[in-house]
């Protein structure tokens, strides 16, 4: 992690703030690298984060057996792994409606008259969850008054450029420099 600011004391304070927020949201280990560039004279705040790869998404077929009764127009799910059952139920309620989902036991879920093919449903996506937490952290880290934000995302890198004025082109160039430097330093440490 690196905080760049002409004011060394300010940089130390922001380093501490960033570390505390990452720890509070329990994403410290998921963050590979984080760079902050602060210039209160402009006012300009740039934050770029690179995060670790996550496990693959969990699909319905990973956690349940699927059986469709065409005559009754029902889908029967026999749950093999309860770990993601709350996420499954939430997704099914969202897609099919709560009144069409019946849970007769911890291990059985019935979907009445399904409108969609849920066989390939993604029940839980760890990367999506991690990205939400990272965005939450970034918006907590950005100073209070800087609410004009430009967003950049590529692969496992997220960058935000923030100010209380319209974002200038040279600030976006500076953001891309920070991203480029981060990528270059990641490349040096790969084995």
Image (cartoon, rainbow, N blue to C red):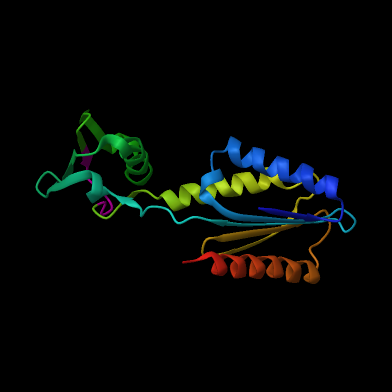
The answer to whether 138 appears left or right of 67 in the picture is right
Q: How many marks?
A: 0
Residue 153, picture quadrant: bottom right
Residue 138 image point, x, y percent: 65, 48
Residue 56, picture quadrant: bottom left
Relative to 69, say whether 47 is above or below. Answer: below
Residue 187 image point, x, y percent: 55, 69
Residue situated furthest right in the rendering: 41
* Residue at the spot 46% in from the left edge and 51% down from the top edge: 128
Q: In this view of the protein, which residue sits in the foreground, 170 or 15?
A: 15
Main SS class of the magenta portion in the image: loop
The answer to whether 4 appears left or right of 93 in the picture is right
* Residue at the spot 19% in from the left edge and 33% down from the top edge: 107
Residue 18, picture quadrant: top right
Residue situated furthest left in the rendering: 71
Q: In this view of the protein, which residue sits in the foreground, 85 or 1?
A: 1
Relative to 91, say whether 185 is above or below. Answer: below
The answer to whether 79 appears left or right of 43 in the picture is left
Task: Please give the range of residues in magenta.
Answer: 110-118
* Residue at the spot 35% in from the left edge and 46% down from the top edge: 95
* Residue at the spot 32% in from the left edge and 44% down from the top edge: 96
Residue 19 image point, x, y percent: 65, 42
Q: In this view of the protein, which residue sits in the foreground, 138 or 93?
A: 138
Residue 86 image point, x, y percent: 34, 35
Asked whether residue 112 is drawn in magenta, I would say yes
């Amino acid at each position: 992690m690196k905080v760049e600011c002409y004011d060394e004391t300010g940089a130390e304070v922001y380093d501490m703030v960033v570390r505390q927020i990452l720890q509070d949201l329990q994403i410290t280990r998921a963050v590979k690298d984080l760079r902050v560039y602060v210039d209160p004279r402009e006012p300009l705040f740039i934050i770029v984060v690179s995060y670790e790869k996550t496990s693959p998404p969990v699909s319905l077929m990973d956690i349940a057996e699927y059986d469709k009764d065409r005559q009754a127009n029902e889908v029967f799910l026999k749950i093999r792994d309860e770990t993601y059952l709350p996420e499954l139920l939430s997704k099914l309620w969202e897609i099919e409606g709560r009144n069409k989902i019946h849970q007769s036991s911890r291990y059985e879920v019935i979907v009445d008259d399904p409108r969609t093919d849920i066989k390939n449903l993604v029940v839980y996506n760890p990367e999506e969850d991690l990205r939400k937490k990272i965005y939450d952290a970034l918006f907590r880290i950005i100073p209070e008054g800087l609410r004009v934000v430009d967003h950049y995302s590529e692969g496992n890198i997220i960058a935000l450029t923030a100010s209380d004025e319209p974002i200038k082109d040279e600030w976006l160039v500076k953001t891309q420099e920070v991203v480029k430097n981060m990528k270059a330093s990641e490349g040096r440490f790969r084995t």
